[in-house]
Amino acid sequence: MKLSNLPMLIVAVLLAGMVWIFFDMSRPITSAHGSAGAGTVASAIAQSTAAKPVMVEFYADWCGPCKEVGPVVDAFAREVASKARVIRVNVDEDPKLGYDHGVRVIPSFLVFKNGKESARESGAISKSRMHELLAE
């Protein structure tokens, strides 16, 4: 890492910390801009089976890697529509949902089978890795 990038990194880390400090985690969960809400995710997880698992991607609109992997997730969702359900959750709109599932890095992909987490991966992953997560 170049030293010239250090001030930008420090600012980014401080801003991310401030968001969590100042955000009131007790406010109601809302579903806006097409992001799945807490009820949708909880219901999908409860209905997940080994034959039809649920993959939940936690992302944010401002996140570079999330923007990069977003179209891949959309294509993957269409590809596996008959075999699995893919849900995208914007952590800026539903921060408590990410917190409740222990999401600390975005993008994060969590797979649920029979109502329980069976796989987890963080970072911009490939479509082939998404398939592997469903198979785990």
Image (cartoon, grey):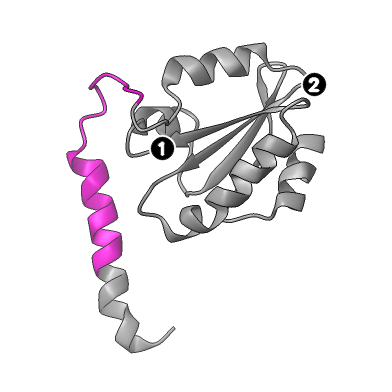
Indicate whether 40 appears above or below 85: above
Write down the residue under mark 1.
90
Q: Residues within 10 Å of mark 2 (few under 14, many from 20)?
A: some
Horizontally, is 19 left or right of 92 in the view?
Answer: left
Quadrant placement of the N terminus? bottom left
Quadrant placement of the C terminus? top right
The residue shown at (54%, 44%) is 108
* Residue 134 counted in the magenta span: no
Indicate whether 132 appears above or below 82: below
Q: Amino acid at mark 2?
A: Ala
Where on the picture, by quarter, is residue 57? top right
Horizontally, is 19 left or right of 51 in the view?
Answer: left
Q: Position of residue 96 (x, y in %)?
A: 36, 28
Element type at mark 2: loop
Foreground residue among 99 and 59: 59
The residue shown at (25%, 77%) is 7
* Camera sees residue 26: yes
Mark toward the start of the polypeptide (2 vs 1): 2
Q: Amino acid at mark 1?
A: Asn
Indicate whether 22 appears above or below 24: below
* Residue 20 counted in the magenta span: yes
Horizontally, is 19 left or right of 129 in the view?
Answer: left
The residue shown at (56%, 54%) is 69
From which residue to which does the magenta span run? 11-31
* Camera sees residue 119: no
Mark 2 or 1, which is nearer the eye? Answer: 1
Write down the residue under mark 2.
50
Q: Position of residue 88 (x, y in %)?
A: 51, 35
